[in-house]
Image (tube, grey):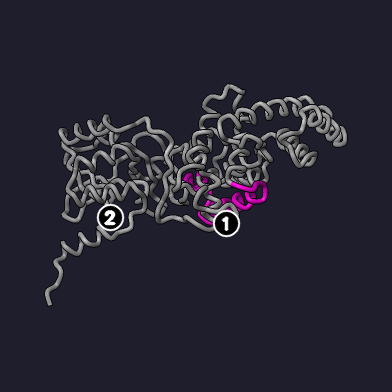
């Protein structure tokens, strides 16, 4: 019996391997074809991850590049693509870079660049000065102003309650250019996620993370006036789209009197006007059906809770079990509040613009409109493949 040569077996294994994302599939195909130019083109269009010493990153200042020996005993700097990031290690953290960054700041021409070591998508690249000029050329040729993209981990959850819950955070995943269906070592980049939580959320400890997470899951992070007004409208009429504005305003004023908080009247009346104007724009832009209306704005807190859980995990403020549990709770809360992905998305969008947009319909609006359009139309979107009531 003639045995199959090792190289032939290796090539066959590469072809039958299940890439974790489309990026690794393209890299594998380029590597199989010996197409270094095509390989560089893929690298130029994706995030690359260096792993650095956590204590050095936390301390700030200069960081040393970690080098390793490849299978042939040559020194190299290893980077990973998104789908090939390794499991968490206590002493190292992921630092997101681009091919242009690597070319500009390469530590030593004697080191080669080793992409995805040990993976069928991997390749070793020389890093001499003229090689790095090719990296820069590939980076300049890359489409750096790409529209929002849906990134799916093919080996991640794509059905069931966890996939449904993660898809409730898909607005942010599309906007930030990260995988929607992963609870992994980082969301985008350890250091950036630490700064995001500290600067935007005032969160730098596990205790602070838990307090903010509890507020999001209880829909207490956003102002209360929009939800009060929307709840009154829901209870007042089964056909809220045709309910007159005056009747809605009077009903809210009566509720505030009953609650003995008439001083909130001006804020609630202002919210009613803003909601009506935003709903009109939503209908014009396809965020709502022609006769649609927003049932609730709590989806904004619940949707952000998914991202907040992943940021906390990335920043090492919570364990994976706590992050996953919070994400599942957010998904369950969304199912209770809404009837469909489109219903949820409109609620998320309204909560966002009422919080941050001043009816300018600028970035705060477009950054939710574009993901909505992608997620409701792309046939590979979880909003098309994961049922709303997925259990």
The image quarter in which residue 361 lies: top right
Q: Position of residue 152 (x, y in %)?
A: 42, 48
Dots 1, 2 in contact, CB < 8 A: no
Residue lying farthest to the front in this orientation? 290
- Of circles 1 and 2, which is in front? 1
Going 60% across and 55% down the picture, which residue do you hit? Answer: 389
Q: Read off the residue under disc 2.
A: 119
Residue lying farthest to the left in this orientation? 2
Residue lying farthest to the top in this orientation? 360
Bounds of the magenta segment: 311-340
The image quarter in which residue 271 lies: top right
Magenta region includes residue 335? yes
Q: Position of residue 144 (x, y in %)?
A: 34, 31
Q: Read off the residue under disc 1.
A: 390
Frontmost residue, 355 versus 273:
273
Q: Taken as a whole, is the magenta stretch helix, strand or loop?
A: helix
Of the two numbered discs 1 and 2 on the same chain, state the one appearing first in sequence.
2
The image quarter in which residue 358 lies: top right
- The crowd level at tag 2 (other Cα within 10 Å; few <14, some 14-19, many 20+) is some
Q: Position of residue 11 (x, y in %)?
A: 20, 59
Quadrant where the image shows the C terminus = bottom right
Secondary structure under the numbered disc 2 in the rendered image = loop
Going 17% across and 50% down the picture, which residue do you hit? Answer: 74
From the viewer's perspective, tell me whether residue 66 is left or right of residue 276. Answer: left
């Amino acid at each position: 019996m003639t045995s199959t040569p090792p190289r032939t077996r290796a090539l066959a294994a590469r072809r039958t391997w299940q890439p974790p994302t489309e990026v690794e599939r393209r890299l594998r195909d380029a590597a199989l074809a010996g197409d270094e130019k095509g390989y560089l083109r893929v690298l130029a269009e994706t995030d690359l991850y260096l792993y650095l010493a956590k204590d050095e990153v936390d301390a700030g200042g200069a960081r040393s590049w970690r080098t390793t020996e490849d299978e042939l005993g040559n020194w190299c700097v290893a980077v990973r693509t998104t789908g090939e990031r390794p499991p968490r290690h206590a002493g190292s953290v992921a630092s997101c870079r681009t091919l242009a960054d690597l070319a500009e700041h390469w530590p030593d021409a004697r080191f080669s660049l080793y992409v995805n070591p040990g993976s069928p998508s991997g390749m070793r690249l020389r890093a001499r000065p003229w090689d790095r000029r090719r990296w820069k050329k590939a980076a300049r040729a890359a489409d750096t102003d790409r529209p929002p993209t849906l990134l799916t981990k093919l080996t991640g959850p794509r059905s069931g309650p966890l996939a449904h819950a993660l898809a409730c955070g898909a607005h942010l995943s599309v906007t930030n250019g990260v995988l929607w269906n992963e609870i992994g070592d980082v969301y985008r980049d350890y250091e950036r996620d630490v700064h995001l939580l500290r600067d935007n959320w005032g969160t730098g400890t596990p205790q602070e993370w838990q307090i903010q997470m509890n507020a999001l899951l209880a829909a207490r992070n956003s102002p209360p006036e929009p939800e009060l007004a929307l709840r009154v409208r829901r209870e007042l009429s089964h056909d809220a789209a045709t309910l007159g504005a005056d009747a809605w305003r009077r009903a809210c004023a009566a509720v505030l009197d009953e609650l003995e908080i008439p001083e909130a009247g001006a804020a609630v009346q202002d919210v009613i006007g803003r909601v009506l104007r935003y709903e009109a724009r939503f209908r014009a832009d396809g965020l709502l059906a022609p006769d649609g209306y927003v049932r609730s704005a709590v989806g904004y807190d619940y949707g952000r809770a998914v991202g907040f859980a992943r940021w906390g995990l990335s920043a090492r403020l919570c364990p994976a079990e706590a992050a996953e549990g919070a994400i599942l709770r957010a998904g369950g809360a969304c199912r209770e509040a809404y009837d469909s992905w489109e219903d949820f998305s409109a609620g998320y969008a309204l909560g966002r613009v009422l919080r941050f947009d001043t009816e300018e319909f600028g970035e705060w609006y477009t950054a939710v409109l574009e993901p909505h359009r992608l997620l409701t139309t792309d046939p590979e979107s979880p909003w098309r493949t994961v049922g709303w009531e997925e259990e």
